[in-house]
Amino acid sequence: MSHLLLPLIQEFLADLVNCGLAKSTISDYRCTLHNFTRLFCGPVSEINAGILRRYLASVGGSPNNRARHFSNLKNFLNWCYRFEYITVNPICKLETPRCHAYPPRPIPTAHLELIADAIKQAEPRVRLLFTLLLETGMRIRETLSIRFNDIDLSPGEEKIIVRGKGDRLRAIPLVPGLLSLELLREKVNKYDPDQIYLFPQPGDVSQPLSYKDAGILWRQLQKQTGTRYRIHQLRHSCATHLLNSGVSIEAIQKLLGHKKLSTTCRYAQLEHSVLRREMACHLRRQKEGEAGVP
């Protein structure tokens, strides 16, 4: 990394930490800035639109990936401008790359049933982990970071407090009828006082199960069922199931911890049969209203 930019980048990343941004977000900024310094090794005051254009042209992957790099650089340069390291932000001269809106990616019902059956037959730790993901739509990192003191199983108040993106807290309700609630009660009844996390790292109960090891458990399930999906698609599947079961999109937004409703809409996919049913109900209500039916 360029010695000229290193101090600024370190200060910028330190400010992101102080703002409470997620570790994965800070890591993404760090990766973008490291890559940028491979192209440009001068002082920040000499960064211009041409240099930025060349860097963005070198970024591979999808248009969304290029847009992400653009956003990271823009925020870094905005920070430099705010602290008067530069007098103008050169990235403002460039057009913002357009992102492609991808449709929801729930796991197809037939494959989801195979995976759900495999989860039910798995050993207790795996069963609880993936049942929670499937029934609550939590992010995998949120689930792995659950501590025992985040769990409240008081009758009528059952919930888990999770730390989402930006270290924002939200409550995940656990209503009677959820298998994950039953499994959680069994786990809490066997609680070891030395255990901090609900899913501890094997050999070190003071640390949560790593994302890498959770991925290994997921791939074992995939191999067993002959399917190939990402863990995150369980979140999409949960949102889609809730939407098609009549849960409001606003309630799903709150459950998933999205700041914007538009983000939730990218997770939940309304099935065609449900859409037809809703349209039929609307027309029936309209006809009843015209006929004066109470």
Image: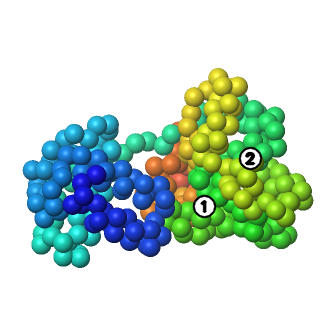
Residue at left offset 50%, top offset 49%: 267
The extreme right residue here reads 189
Identity of the amino acid at label 1? Leu
- Relative to 293, does residue 63 appear above or below in the rendering? above
Q: Quadrant of residue 293?
A: bottom right
- Relative to 200, does residue 114 appear above or below in the rendering? above
**Where is residue 2 drawn, in percent x and y?**
24, 54
Residue at left offset 29%, top offset 47%: 35
Disc on res. 255: 1
The extreme front residue here reads 3
- Relative to 18, does residue 163 appear above or below in the rendering? above
Q: Is residue 293 visible?
A: no
N-terminal-most mark, 1 or 2? 2
The answer to whether marks 1 and 2 mark residues whose Cβ atoms lie closer than 8 Å is no
In the foreground, 137 or 122: 122
In the foreground, 32 or 112: 32
Provide the secondary structure element on which disc 2 rests: loop
Q: Which residue is mark 2?
A: 202
Q: Is residue 191 visible?
A: yes
Image quadrant occupied by the C terminus: bottom right
